[in-house]
Image (spheres, grey):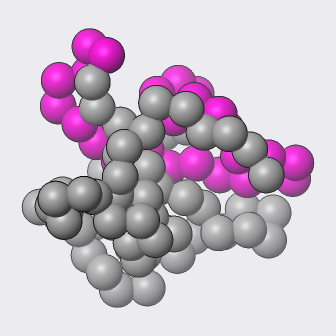
Amino acid sequence: MTNIRITRPPIYVLSGMSKGWHNIGVWVQGGGIRLGYVAELRFNGKAYPENPSVSPAKRLEGKLRGKVLIPSAQGAKPPYEDQST
């Protein structure tokens, strides 16, 4: 569907949907971003955004609603993660 750049695991399948596809959450950190965050990527009918650090991707605030699809190598999760769907 797309090639999403500058992401790190964990990668999430979020409970929200756009155009019939689940939103994706990706961890963004590094390259000047000192405090990492989860960015939400929404399907626009053709693809997901390629760069999670700029619009239309947006920083998720509050509890993350979804499930880990690809865990981090260390198994670490953001402290606010909520695995409920």
Number of marks in picture: 0
Q: Nearer the viewer, residue 72 or 17?
A: 72
Q: Farthest residue to the right: give it.
A: 46
Residue 83 at what x, y percent from top left? 31, 81
Q: Relative to residue 10, is residue 41 drawn left or right?
A: right
Does residue 82 appear anywhere in the picture?
A: yes
Q: Residue at x 87, y 53 (%)?
A: 45
Q: Nearer the viewer, residue 84 or 76?
A: 76
Q: Nearer the viewer, residue 54 or 2?
A: 2
Residue 68 at what x, y percent from top left? 39, 72
Q: Is residue 50 magenta?
A: yes
Q: Residue at x 27, y 24 (%)?
A: 30
Q: Farthest residue to the bottom: give it.
A: 84
Q: Residue at x 65, y 52 (%)?
A: 42
Q: Relative to residue 17, is residue 77 drawn left or right?
A: left
Q: Provide the residue span drawn in magenta.
A: 31-55
Residue 24 at what x, y percent from top left? 55, 58
- When asked about the image quadrant of residue 70, the answer is bottom left
Q: Farthest residue to the left: give it.
A: 79
Q: Is residue 15 magenta?
A: no
**Predominant SS along the magenta part:** loop
Above or below 1: residue 7: above
Q: Farthest residue to the top: give it.
A: 32
Above or below 34: residue 7: below
Does residue 44 appear anywhere in the picture?
A: no
Residue 82 at what x, y percent from top left? 26, 75
Q: Quadrant of the C terminus?
A: bottom left
Q: Residue at x 26, y 13 (%)?
A: 32
Q: Relative to residue 42, is residue 15 drawn left or right?
A: left
Above or below 57: residue 73: below
